[in-house]
Image (spheres, helix red, strand yellow):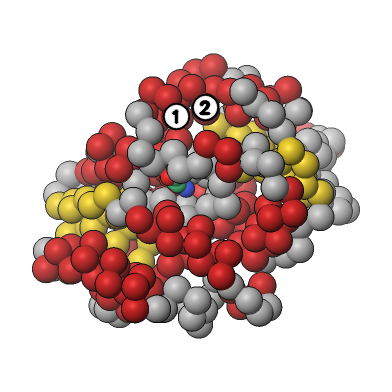
Amino acid sequence: MDQDSTQLEDMPCVFDNAPIGVFDSGFGGLTVAREIAKALPHESIVYVGDSARCPYGPRSLDEVGGYVQQIGSWLVDHGVKLIVIACNTATAAGLAEAQRTFPVPVIGVVEPGARAAAHATKNRRVGVIATKATVESDAYTKAIRHIDAGITVFSTATPRFVEIAEQGIRMAEGPIENYTSLASKVYIRPAFQEIAREYLEPLRRCDIDTLVLGCTHFPLLKALIGGVVGREVTLISSAKEAARDVAEALGRRNALAGIDREPRYDFFTTGEDIDEFRSFGSRVFRTPIDNVAHVDLS
Ligand code: DGL
């Protein structure tokens, strides 16, 4: 056995069982949290849903950047080992500043979505739907073109999709495990289809072959959106890709949780209605949510 392999075998296994902090303006970031839980089943998660200030989309980037600092500091005080900004608007508004400020790694959702889109497109025509603030920040266009400057990006703000996504969570019945699948019919109703057609027809006419769901609420609307843009357009959500980035970042730092660990999931909402967060959040997270508490960040 050579010197190097002896040294590797003698190295102690290092684990970090501190939780991962994840946040969003509401329920949308749970689409990211559930992918993290799926990819990293031993990791504990502390989730903050800023329901009291949802939606972020119509607010200014400065204001949302302030929320990022506030929630990030709270998560750091709660001992998280990494922060995921599971909101595109908040990523566009505050990722860079958060990475400069916090003593733990911070991962956003724009770059992972941009990367997935750049890899998926064949005709190099990519659509992006997102909140008004995200579209105005130009974050996706820059991120996609940073990977491949030859890609043409068509962006549209679709603010009513956040409203529809949140409404649908309230209207849904039935088993939570089916709720966010493509088979979910809760969003397939004429009023929603009308709005979706209005937003998406112009993008379809741009001959895009890939569409980025640039808001973490939008994976809930996959069936509705897919029904309008058609099967030939690949829908990209950054959740899976972001979860992969989290695994990689923790692995690189020897900071993964021990494999004998039962994960713990703790949820905090800035909203007043804990029961509502528990019941609707369970639908999006696809697992019953037990530990929910109110947090006052103001
Ligand atoms: N989920 C947030 C995002 O990804 C937006 C929802 C909101 O407007 O608060 O951008």
Quadrant in the picture for the N terminus: top right
Quadrant in the picture for the C terminus: top right
Count the numbered circles shown.
2
Look at label 1 and name its amino acid: Val
**Above/below status of 243 relative to 285:** above
Give the structural element (helix, strand or loop) at label 2. helix
The furthest residue to the top: 101
Q: Which mark is residue 40?
A: none
> Does any portion of residue 224 appear in the rendered image?
yes
Give the structural element (helix, strand or loop) at label 1. helix
Q: Which mark is residue 64?
A: 1
> Does any portion of residue 243 appear in the rendered image?
no
Label 2 sits on residue: 67
Q: Are marks 1 and 2 in contact (CB under 8 Å)?
A: yes
Residue placed most toward the observer, 227 or 240 = 227
In the picture provided, is 130 more to the left or to the right than 209? right
Are there few (<14), some (14-19), or many (20+) residues within 10 Å of tag 1?
many
Residue located at (46% from left, 43% from top): 55
Residue located at (65% from left, 60% from top): 280
